[in-house]
Amino acid sequence: FTLALLERIKHFFSVPKVNFVLVTNLDQLKKSVSYSYGSDDEEARMYLQKFYHLATRLPEKKQLRGQSHIDGFISYVFNDFSKFEAESVHRQSIITSLSSIAEIRGYSLRTIEKISTRIALVLASADSRQLALAPLITCLCAFKIDCPELYMKAQNRTINLNEVEGFFVFSKWRKHVDLSETLAHDLWKYCLGSGSGDIKIFMGRNRFHEWRNVLPATCELIEGLKFSEER
């Protein structure tokens, strides 16, 4: 299909001031030429040169995943999200949390985009009280996209802290002034019944009074179901 498309572009759309930018794997394309026309690698390379005037290589995946690149992408996604006009602290908490998770899990930009879309859908229906759970929401959305089995266990409250810590490795989260790594870890401890005094005060201040209900209720929010006022 790709080879046929190239030939059509060459023969039918070769008109002045019309340029095409093509993204492809040249090595795979050479194999297609060799298979179709019985040519060797050199002949295939020469044949393909008829279809382009300039070729360049994109960075390797490991180079593309530089953390500054990921941070910039995530910041771009959430900086213009209108929900955060007066909630910049929660925006930064999400950016920090997702950046750390992406670094540890080695996410591609496509996976980050899927998780970000899920987070944005959740936050569109969240109120200011629920936004206080931003790091937890981020973690659960990462579970939902990357590991549905653990998401289901969190939803059913059968997940344990070792599974959570093994997946997110909070100790490797980069340190930020908003202390997202501490809050995320403490929120999970609270939800699983081992929260400290400080996180209990934080949750009480945001009117979350029963730790057993927080995970199921947050998953309801993620699934688009009603989030009751008293949890």
Image (cartoon, rainbow, N blue to C red):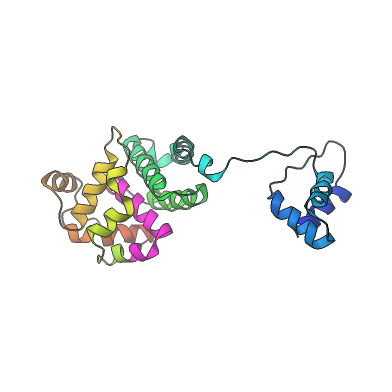
Residue name at image x 35 percent, y 35 percent: 88
What secondary structure prevails in the magenta region? Answer: helix
The answer, for residue 122, to whether it is visible in the render is yes
Camera-side residue of 210 and 63: 63
Percent across and percent down for residue 99 are 40, 42
Camera-side residue of 163 and 125: 163
Percent across and percent down for residue 19 are 79, 39
Residue name at image x 29 percent, y 49 percent: 130
Camera-side residue of 93 and 32: 32
**Extent of the magenta region:** 126-152
Percent across and percent down for residue 103 are 41, 44
The answer, for residue 231, to whether it is visible in the render is no
Left or right of 219 in this view: 7:
right
Residue name at image x 73 percent, y 39 percent: 55
Q: Is 37 covered by the magenta stretch?
A: no
Q: Is residue 212 above or below residue 205?
A: below
Left or right of 124 in this view: 130:
left
User: If the image is split into quadrants, where does the N terminus sit?
Assistant: bottom right
Left or right of 42 in this view: 103:
left
Q: Is residue 133 above or below residue 87?
A: below
Residue situated furthest top in the rendering:
177
